[in-house]
Image: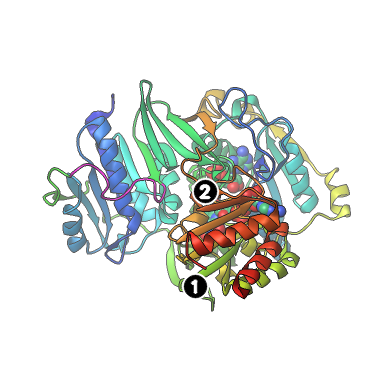
Amino acid sequence: MRIAVCIKQVPDTEARLRVGKDGRWIAEEDLPFRINESDEYALEEGLTLAEARGGEVVVFSLGPERVKEALRKALALGAARAVHLRDEAFLGGDALATGKALAKAIAREGFDLVLTGSQSDDVGYGGTGSVVAGHLGWPHAWLVMGVEIEDGGTVKVKREMESGLNEIFRTRLPAVLEIQAGINHPRYASLKGIMQAKKKPLDEVGPGDLGLDPAEVGAAGSRLEIVSVAFPETGAGAQRIEAPPAEAARILVEKLQQEARVL
Amino acid sequence: MAHAANGVWVVLQQREGRLHRMSREAIAAGGRLAGVIGGRAEAVLLGSGMGELAREVAGLDVAAVHVADAPALAGYTPGAYVGALAPAIRQAAPAYVVFPHTYQTVDYLARLAQETGSALLPEVTGFDETPEGLLWRRPVLGGKLHSKVRVKGGGTVLVSVQSGAFQAGGTAAAPAAGSAEVRALPGELSTLRPDREILEVEEVAGAVDLTKAEVIVAVGRGIGGPDKLGPVHELAKALGAEIGASRPVIDNEWLPRDRQIGSSGQTVAPKLYLALGISGAIQHTVGMKGSGTVVAVNKDPNAPIFNLADYGIVADVHELIPALTAAVKAAKAT
Ligand SMILES: Cc1cc2nc3c(=O)[nH]c(=O)nc-3n(C[C@H](O)[C@H](O)[C@H](O)COP(=O)(O)OP(=O)(O)OC[C@H]3O[C@@H](n4cnc5c(N)ncnc54)[C@H](O)[C@@H]3O)c2cc1C
Ligand SMILES: Nc1ncnc2c1ncn2[C@@H]1O[C@H](COP(=O)(O)O)[C@@H](O)[C@H]1O
């Protein structure tokens, strides 16, 4: 089974975020980056399926040079090869533009299954995987919490619904499954894996290699333009209790008793 | 505005003949948008045996109800939904098609955008009119920041609206509510093909019912790990509280899935909700915003949870939790 997994590198939101100089995005200098959370689960799902059924995982990532770090990590975890969509023209895309570029890169090889995360932790369009599926003409599913490959070219999928419900359905392969966080337990890289990753192939491709005009991808090919970002206004907000822990706790309990009357 | 002519559609979500609660918020958003570009919003309903629901929708603040009624639409599948909506959108070319931002909508919205050559604008929380056109608000980076987004180019824009962003019924008085015309959505429905064979709907197994809890101590990723839960249990005991959690705590198996609060988990409304090390992403807050009094403890003074909380303490949870347990015990002792 040949499996493609799309991984995005995103800012680690645990870090202290600042708005960048032009106000259009956060300042990325000095920010730590990581593999998008749901993509880690997608990668784990792909590796487990390939191990169980034979086959290999190829990881794809679109982004600037730093993205190689995420791809190397995926190789260390067990992916066989990596493809880096690397060109200025690819950057700043919405789900339609990014999905198109990823689909073109994936379509150059034959795959039985494409896995993506369900939502990126930075722009969070929740649609890039579906767009990949549309270009490939394959079925897809979003928020996947279970994948069971069946004989005869079908797959049983568990899709998360709201309020603690899951829908289980069957669809045909090949398919694009957009994996939700929590589906499995992502593994850690071993020292051996990290050493081996250095020798695994990591190819770069640009729009030309994919038969794409730079104007159809990235910011130029997108219908959305982020004009500004800001921290949410604090509005009314919470009544802040500013004191050392023991004192803050005491004041809080007093307020909960006397003001809010909930204790 | 250039696209005013073709108006605003609102695609409602229903299950077994009942509207999803966010469908009404989508109508409110559609109404506001129509107010900006001119005209009134029109509803779109997909399903099988929709007669009664169509009449109900005709009583809401919409100018018309377009119904796609076919056996292939009895249950939701993206194949049949996109198959029914895409030709109609291409033909009528509405300026905006508004959807409730539900898991079902997200499942097919991007494919619908692609099929129809529309712009895809998911999860909006509002919009502002500016001389350069509409600027849309949507959360980024897990809700830690908000972005303002412009749509480039012409044609239809598919917009999904986040829960709580547009209050249902909160718009200006409906001029002719109750008299909307019900018509068939244009397009051939006999060739629709579901692309999924639905097997079953299962309930995520769980024994814990948090919906009746009076006090909930909820922990987030900021708690740091399963070995840090001891003091949380002690605090919960002192308060007589149930323990709840945000999704990452569950995904990492620090606590079982039946403790998850939020859009995929339980919706709770205790008298008192303590959010400890929780950032306050919308998928979490939709599950707890009905709580009476909310206390947030977070080391990040900018954490969005502070906007929703009644009381906020900027602190390390590991210092504050034992202090709070001691303070609760001391108060109860007197
Ligand atoms: C389709 C979908 C469905 C989802 N469903 C749900 C759902 O049902 N429920 C849910 O909760 N989420 C859900 N999520 C995830 C949601 O988007 C957020 O990612 C999640 O709620 C974040 O959890 P958190 O606040 O615990 O973690 P984070 O966002 O990582 O926040 C951790 C917080 O802890 C603080 N912190 C760290 N260390 C400390 C310390 N020592 N002391 C004090 N504070 C500290 C940090 O400042 C930060 O604010 C869903 C997401 C998607 C895409
Ligand atoms: N630049 C990218 N490179 C690789 N995969 C991506 C990229 N952007 C999005 N994806 C994939 O698409 C999923 C959904 O992203 P989004 O539509 O931005 O929420 C992510 O979880 C990734 O798996």
- Res. B228 mark: none
Residue sitting nearer the eye, B323 or B220 = B323
**Residue B129: x and y, percent?**
35, 28
Under tag 2, what secondary structure? loop
Q: Amino acid at mark 2?
A: Ala
Q: Is residue B168 magenta?
A: yes
| Residue picked out by circle 1 | B213
Image quarter in which the N terminus of chain A is found: bottom right
A51 horizontally vs A216: left or right: right
Helix, strand or loop: magenta stretch: loop
Is B266 positioned to the left or the right of A15 in the image?
left
In the rendered structure, the residue with mark 1 lies on which chain? B
Q: How many marks?
A: 2
The residue shown at (37%, 60%) is: B76
Residue B84 included in the magenta stretch of the image: no
Q: Residue at x 63, y 60 (%)?
A: A250
Separation of marks 2 and 1 at Cα, in angstroms: 23 Å
Place of residue B237 in the rendered image (x, y in percent of width and height, measured from the top left): 63, 75
Q: Is residue B330 above or below residue A56?
A: below
For residue A223, say whether it is visible: no
In the displayed image of the protein, which residue is found farthest to the front? B334
Viewer-proximal residue, A102 or B137? Answer: B137
- Determine crowd level at label 2: few under 14, some 14-19, many 20+ residues with C-alpha closer than 10 A: some
Asked if the residue under mark 1 is in contact with the one under mark 2, i.e. CB atoms within 8 Å, the reply is: no
Give the residues in magenta: B162-173
Residue A97 against residue B268 in the figure, above or below: above
Q: Position of residue B327 (x, y in %)?
A: 65, 65
Q: Nearer the viewer, residue A119 or B38?
A: B38
Task: Tell me the amino acid under the disc marked 1.
Answer: Ala
Q: Which residue is mark 2?
A: A238
Tag 2 subunit: A
Tell me the quarter of the picture where residue B53 sits. Answer: bottom left
